[in-house]
Image: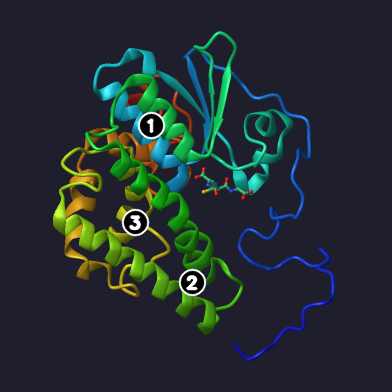
Amino acid sequence: MTETYEPPKVWTWDTESGGRFASINRPIAGPTHDKVLPVGKHPHQLYSLATPNGVKVTVMFEELLALGIKEAEYDAWLIKIGDGDQFGSGFVEVNPNSKIPALMDHSTATPTRVFESGAILLYLAEKFGQFLGGNRPEMLSWLFWQMGSAPYLGGGFGHFYAYAPEKWEYPINRFAMETKRQLDVLERRLAETEYLAGSDYTIADMAIWAWYGQLALGRLYSAGEFLDVESYTQVQRWAKQIDARPAVLRGRMVNKVSGEPELQLHERHDASDFDTQTQDKIAPQE
Ligand SMILES: N[C@@H](CCC(=O)N[C@@H](CS)C(=O)NCC(=O)O)C(=O)O
């Protein structure tokens, strides 16, 4: 970094940062416009997008349905964060933090809102008594590890490596080092146990896989080679094992709006949508 910056006494919002999401970032919360959210036929209404934070929850729903739990049926509505849908009044009522994923459970006496992906995973796991594993303190520790660690990967490394208007050495070094340290934390744990909380696949694996598993598989920020992800052999073993689960593939497809058309299911309102509503089927390429 060659330019230095003298911060003023009081920060003011008078310039856009120029980064990839500059047009949607702002220093105030609350809605920018009125927009009622749609409600479908299923007990759970999910408002989301297939980013790592969104994918955790769609994987969880698909895993619950794969167990035959019909009460876990859900509608997944698309929230285009690049268009500012997260600032619509209806969305802000479900998540005052204006970030996907957000869930409304209409199966309770009055609808229950749940926001923050970790809270949603825990809510669903407790509601259906699944994917909690046999060692609750260990599972919760890894689940909360993800919540505290991923902002360094996404907001730190990913932002400066892939989204910032220019490549600056200082922040890329700082956050590449931290991301590699985190990968090594996972590597050492996964050398001891099959899954993060022990021998059971849990919501902690779903949460961590969506970020670090996909990073290890080379799907995030085109950074696989830069971070030498192949060298984390236990993380590779675990990431591929989870990636091979059919429910994980379905979860990755829901609310996905980029990449291969056959993997994009913009909205999911029925299990059959995976066979009939993917982009290759409803909008075939010329
Ligand atoms: N800690 C939150 C993070 C959610 C989050 O950062 N969501 C991003 C997409 S991955 C978002 O909606 N960004 C829109 C914005 O910041 O305006 C969670 O785990 O649910």
From what the image shows, is residue 273 above or below residue 141?
Answer: above
Side of 167 relative to 279 (left or right): right
Kindly state the secondary structure of the residue where label 1 is placed: helix
Give the Cα distance between marks 1 and 2. Answer: 35 Å
Report if the beta carbon of the residue with label 3 is closer than 8 angstroms to ligand 1. Answer: no
Side of 195 relative to 220 (left or right): left
Give the Cα distance between marks 1 and 3. Answer: 31 Å
Of badges 3 and 2, nearer the viewer stands: 3
In the rendered structure, which amino acid carries the disc numbered 2? Tyr
From what the image shows, is residue 183 above or below residue 128?
Answer: below
> Which label was assigned to residue 161?
2
Where residue 152 sits in the image (x, y, percent)?
48, 63
Of badges 1 and 3, nearer the viewer stands: 3
Query: Of the residues under marks 3 and 2, which one precedes in the sequence?
Result: 2
Residue tagged 3: 212
In the rendered structure, which amino acid carries the disc numbered 3? Tyr
Q: Residues within 10 Å of mark 1 (few under 14, many from 20)?
A: some
> Which label was assigned to residue 281?
1
In the rendered structure, which amino acid carries the disc numbered 1? Lys
Of all residues shown, which one is farthest toward the top?
Answer: 109
Q: Residue at image x 29%, y 32%?
A: 132
Where's the C terminus, which quadrant? top left
Give the camera-side residue of 171 and 32: 171
Give the Cα distance between marks 3 and 2. Answer: 16 Å
Q: Residue at image x 46%, y 32%?
A: 120
Where residue 118 sits in the image (x, y, percent)?
45, 40
Q: Residue at image x 47%, y 77%?
A: 174
**Number of numbered labels in the structure image:** 3
Where residue 18 sits in the image (x, y, percent)?
68, 68
Image quadrant of residue 70? top left
> Which label was assigned to residue 66?
none
Kindly state the secondary structure of the residue where label 2 is placed: helix
